[in-house]
Amino acid sequence: MKIIYSVKFQHALKKFPLALVEKVIERTILFEKNIFDSRLNTHKLHGKLKNLWSFSVNEKYIILFQFGKSKNEVIFLYIGDHDLYK
């Protein structure tokens, strides 16, 4: 699985404390092994975000992503709390 990190994602991640960044790394490794691992709660979004997917980092934070041009490529678009859905 190839993951591309958008500039927006990278900027948002830089603002997080180290403990949360470590959790993101842990979840990303899990994501790379199995994108639909039940611990990630990966799901397709609806409404204005209907072309995007998300998975959980923890109870508060999620990562928004979309599938890339190849079936083995995803683009991490943004990381933040559930207010991203609004």
Image: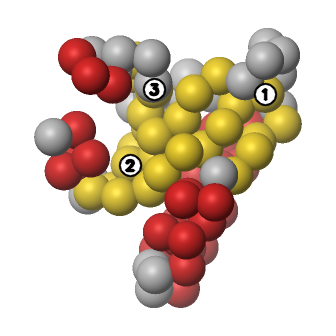
Q: Is residue 20 above or below residue 32?
A: below
Answer few, some or many: residues within 10 Å of disc 1's Cα (few below 14, many 20 plus, some between 14 and 19).
some
Label 3, label 2: how many angstroms apart (C-alpha)?
A: 10 Å
**Residue at the disc numbered 1:** 73
Residue 76 image-quadrant placement: top right
Q: Quadrant of the N terminus?
A: top right
Q: Is residue 67 above or below residue 74?
A: above
Asked which secondary structure carries label 3, the reply is strand
**Residue at the disc numbered 3:** 53
Question: In the image, what residue occupies the spot 54% across and 35% down?
Answer: 65
**Label 3 is placed on what type of residue?**
Trp
Q: How many marks?
A: 3
| N-term-proximal mark, 1 vs 2 | 2
Q: Is residue 3 visible?
A: yes
**Residue at the disc numbered 2:** 62
| N-term-proximal mark, 3 vs 1 | 3
Q: Quadrant of the C terminus?
A: top left
